[in-house]
Image (tube, rainbow, N blue to C red):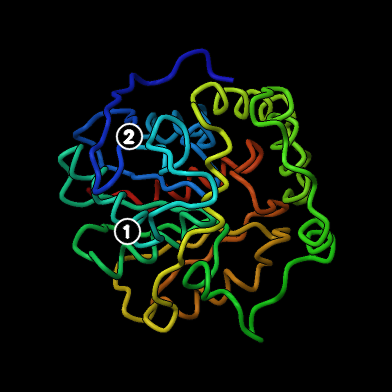
């Protein structure tokens, strides 16, 4: 891992109904990238070294804890009072806090669904759109005969889920996330040391680690898939060829439904934060996509 990273600036963002812990790296005068994470993922899951490579490539990179993760506001377990729409609005609050009228938006998994909502509701705030490991429209929109189903192995994981960990036990929580990484990984070997370090840091920064599971229970909002043709922001789709949750056909659907989309396959990547082995492809693609301020 890198010995040093670009200097960061942290702030607490006051959104409507929640405070969000955000962190920025790099030169504020450089093209700005806002990273939106997936379900249950604090900002820690955007790997430090990955973020550093983007910043060192001449980008101002912002990551943040979504509601119910990290040091952001937590809500009652199993009874969150926010929706997908609120989460997309939170991204705008982060841009406002960093005095950005617009930015390059990068969303992964659930964050990719939020990014699609964001560009439709506030197109003037989105310079470019990059979608990783996601599906057309996001939750509630991602089903249809033209979209391939999840893998049989992952279907079994959902059908017979492992018991929830003791959320007060750091080692048990790390083991829980490591098992999930293996279940959702593709053919690239899982870097267990890196996953353990990330999960441990996320645990240490989260006063209520169990709250992140609230993401699975929130209202998905109005379906937006039928509106994807309205997106005019230059769009890049990066998708693992071995994604067991959203097989590659989901990426192909995004590329068909969002005009002018560039689609780049990432060999061997599953449904996961980008493994280090993929960074040469993914960082180069995002840097190229965000070359204008």
Q: Position of residue 264 (x, y in %)?
A: 55, 61
Mark 2: give few (<14), some (14-19) or many (20+) Cα within 10 Å: some
Viewer-nearest of labels 2 and 1?
1
Decide if residue 21 is on the left or right side of residue 245.
left
Q: Position of residue 216 (x, y in %)?
A: 56, 56
**Which of these two is toward me, 187 or 142?**
142
Residue sitting at the far top: 3
**Badge 2 element:** loop
Q: Please tell me which residue is depicted at 26% across the width and 50% down the height of the picture.
A: 103
- Disc 1 target residue: 128
Residue sitting at the far bottom: 145
Q: Quadrant of the N terminus?
A: top right
**Which of these two is toward me, 267 or 168?**
168
Q: Quadrant of residue 98?
A: top left
Decide if residue 255 is on the left or right side of residue 291.
right
* Residue 58: assigned label: 2
Decide if residue 206 is on the left or right side of residue 124.
right
Q: Position of residue 136 (x, y in %)?
A: 50, 72
Q: Position of residue 113 (x, y in %)?
A: 46, 63
Decide if residue 162 is on the left or right side of residue 291.
right
Q: Please tell me which residue is depicted at 46% across the width and 80% down the height of the picture.
A: 257
Q: Please tell me which residue is depicted at 83% across the width and 66% down the height of the picture.
A: 152
Is residue 177 visible in this depiction of the protein? Answer: yes
Q: Please tell me which residue is depicted at 69% across the width and 29% down the height of the picture.
A: 174
**Which of these two is toward me, 287 or 86?**
86
The count of marks equals 2
Is residue 59 visible in this depiction of the protein? Answer: no
Picture layout, residue 93 above or below residue 118? above
Q: Quadrant of residue 197?
A: top right
Mark 1: give few (<14), some (14-19) or many (20+) Cα within 10 Å: many
**Badge 1 element:** strand
Q: Quadrant of residue 28?
A: top left
């Amino acid at each position: 891992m890198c010995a040093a990273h670009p200097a960061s600036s942290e702030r607490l963002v006051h959104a409507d109904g929640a405070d969000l812990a955000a962190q920025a790296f790099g030169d504020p005068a450089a093209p700005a990238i806002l990273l939106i994470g997936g379900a249950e993922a604090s900002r820690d899951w955007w790997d430090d070294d990955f973020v550093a490579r983007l910043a060192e490539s001449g980008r101002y990179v912002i990551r943040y804890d979504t509601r119910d993760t990290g040091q952001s506001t937590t809500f009652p377990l199993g009874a969150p009072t926010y929706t997908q729409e609120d989460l997309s609005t939170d991204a705008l609050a982060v841009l406002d806090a960093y005095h950005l009228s617009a930015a390059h938006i990068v969303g992964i998994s659930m964050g990719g669904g939020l990014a699609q909502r964001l560009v439709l509701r506030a197109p003037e705030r989105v310079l470019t759109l990059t979608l990783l490991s996601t599906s057309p429209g996001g939750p509630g929109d991602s089903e249809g005969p033209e979209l391939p189903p999840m893998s049989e192995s992952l279907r079994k994981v959902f059908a017979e889920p492992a018991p929830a960990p003791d959320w007060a036990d750091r080692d048990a929580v790390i083991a829980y996330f490591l098992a999930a990484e293996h279940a959702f990984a593709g053919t690239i070997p899982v870097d267990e040391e890196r996953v353990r370090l990330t999960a441990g840091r996320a645990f240490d920064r989260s006063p209520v680690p169990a709250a992140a599971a609230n993401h699975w229970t929130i209202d998905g909002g109005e379906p937006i898939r039928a509106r994807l043709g309205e997106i005019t922001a230059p769009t890049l789709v990066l998708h693992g060829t071995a994604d067991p949750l959203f097989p590659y056909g989901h990426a192909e659907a995004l590329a068909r439904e969002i005009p002018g989309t560039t689609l780049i396959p990432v060999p061997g990547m599953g449904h996961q934060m980008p493994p280090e082995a993929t960074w040469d492809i993914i960082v180069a693609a995002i840097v190229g996509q965000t070359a204008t301020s």
